[in-house]
């Protein structure tokens, strides 16, 4: 099991690992479920290789809540500096209008210091 703590200034033991959890959330009308899910699933072909090339990416998850009309992308990073590269990744930026055309409205992306795991 990987143990994570908050920002290095808050660490009590130097052996603990610093991580950032980046969360992107969106909502869609339930009558657009098929459109949103299809676009989200198709995004893997455009994103997987680009994500695998990124420094510091530990995990990446794409999830959908079909009954609530919500989607969530969660990525885990080794540093804030590596995490914010996602904001400029061309392949990721190209996906936003595709998902918006499928009815998805995005919330502000947030970057969280991991406190524990």
Image: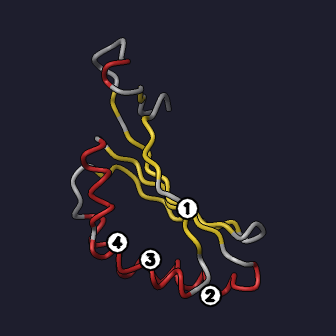
Instruction: Please report the residue visible at 49 percent of the width from the left and 28 percent of the height from the top.
Output: 116
Q: Estimate how packed mark 1 is, as few (under 14), some (14 to 19) or many (20 or more) residues with alpha carbons within 10 Å.
A: few
Instruction: Please report the residue visible at 47 percent of the width from the left and 56 percent of the height from the top.
Output: 109
Question: Is the Cβ of the residue at disc 1 closer than 8 Å to that at disc 2?
Answer: no
Where residue 67 appears, x then y in whole percent?
A: 78, 69
Q: Earlier in the sequence, mark 1 or mark 4?
A: 4
In the picture shown, does residue 61 fall above or below 104?
Answer: above
Q: Earlier in the sequence, mark 1 or mark 2?
A: 2
Q: Earlier in the sequence, mark 2 or mark 3?
A: 2
Where residue 114 appears, x then y in whole percent?
A: 45, 34
Q: Which residue is mark 2?
A: 35
Foreground pick, 13 / 92: 92
Q: Estimate how packed mark 4 is, as few (under 14), some (14 to 19) or many (20 or more) residues with alpha carbons within 10 Å.
A: few
In the current view of this chain or complex, which residue is farthest to the front?
108
Q: Which residue is mark 3?
A: 96
Foreground pick, 48 / 32: 32
Taking the image as shown, residue 39 lies to the left or right of residue 11, namely right
Q: Which residue is mark 4?
A: 48
Taking the image as shown, residue 24 lies to the left or right of residue 30, namely left
Disc 4 versus disc 3: distance between alpha carbons? Answer: 15 Å
Where residue 63 appears, x then y in whole percent?
A: 58, 64
Which mark's residue is nearer the viewer, 2 or 4? 2
Secondary structure under tag 1 reads loop
> What is the quadrant of residue 69 in the picture?
bottom right
Q: Estimate how packed mark 3 is, as few (under 14), some (14 to 19) or many (20 or more) residues with alpha carbons within 10 Å.
A: some
In the picture shown, does residue 34 fall above or below 12?
Answer: below
Disc 1 versus disc 4: distance between alpha carbons? Answer: 22 Å
In the picture shown, does residue 83 fall above or below 29?
Answer: above
Question: Is the Cβ of the residue at disc 4 closer than 8 Å to that at disc 3?
Answer: no
Where residue 56 appears, x then y in whole percent?
A: 26, 49
């Amino acid at each position: 099991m990987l143990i994570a703590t908050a920002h290095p200034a808050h660490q009590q033991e130097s052996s603990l690992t610093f991580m950032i959890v980046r969360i992107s959330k969106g909502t869609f009308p339930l009558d657009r479920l098929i459109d949103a899910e299809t676009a989200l699933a198709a995004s893997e072909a455009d994103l997987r290789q680009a994500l695998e090339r990124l420094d510091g990416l530990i995990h990446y998850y794409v999830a959908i809540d079909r009954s609530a009309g919500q989607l969530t992308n969660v990525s885990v990073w080794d540093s804030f500096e590596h995490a914010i590269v996602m904001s400029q990744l061309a392949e990721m930026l190209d996906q936003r209008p595709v998902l918006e055309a499928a009815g998805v409205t995005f919330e502000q992306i947030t970057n969280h210091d991991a406190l524990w795991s």
